[in-house]
Amino acid sequence: MFASKGAQVLRAFSALNGRTAIQNSVRNSGHACNYRCAGPPAHPKVIMAAEFVGGFAWWWVLWHLWTEPGHITGEFEFPDASKWTNQELGIPEE
């Protein structure tokens, strides 16, 4: 609703000024527009750099999972809850 009223207001102001209120401008962005189509192919150096960075990242993650699993699994043994007493669990004695 606001958009339709706004368009009417713009038309009214443009009629007062004697010129159109909405003007189309040329975008000089310096690159091709890729709307609903594939972009230009990447440079081979960019592809090689991306492959190298991705490979290094996977190596870093897998190496640290292999050599330092404590970051994922924890550094200490998980306690066995079946061995806890009622007092440790906070259960009152009857």
Image (spheres, rainbow, N blue to C red):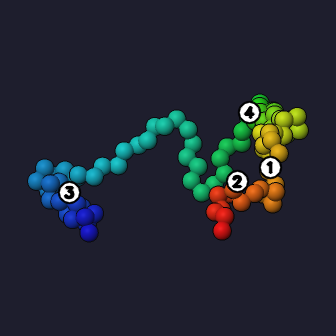
- C-beta proximity under 8 Å, tags 3 and 2: no
- C-beta proximity under 8 Å, tags 2 and 4: no
Circle 2 packing at 10 Å, graded few (<14), some (14-19), many (20+), is few
Q: Distance between the residues labelled 1 and 2?
A: 16 Å
Q: Could you tell which of marks 3 and 1 lies nearer the N-terminus?
A: 3
**Residue 51 is at least partly visible in this image:** no
The reply, left or right, for residue 88 in relation to residue 65 is left
Which of these two is toward me, 91 or 72?
Answer: 91
Judging by the rendered image, the residue that carries numbered circle 1 is 78
Q: Could you tell which of marks 1 and 4 lies nearer the N-terminus?
A: 4
Judging by the rendered image, the residue that carries numbered circle 2 is 88
Judging by the rendered image, the residue that carries numbered circle 3 is 10
Residue 76 falls in which quadrant of the image?
top right
Q: Residue at x 28, y 63 (%)?
A: 3
Query: Residue 75: x percent and y percent?
Result: 80, 39
Give the residue type at disc 4. Answer: Val
Circle 3 packing at 10 Å, graded few (<14), some (14-19), many (20+), is some
Q: Distance between the residues labelled 3 and 2?
A: 75 Å
Q: Quadrant of the N terminus?
A: bottom left
Circle 1 packing at 10 Å, graded few (<14), some (14-19), many (20+), is few
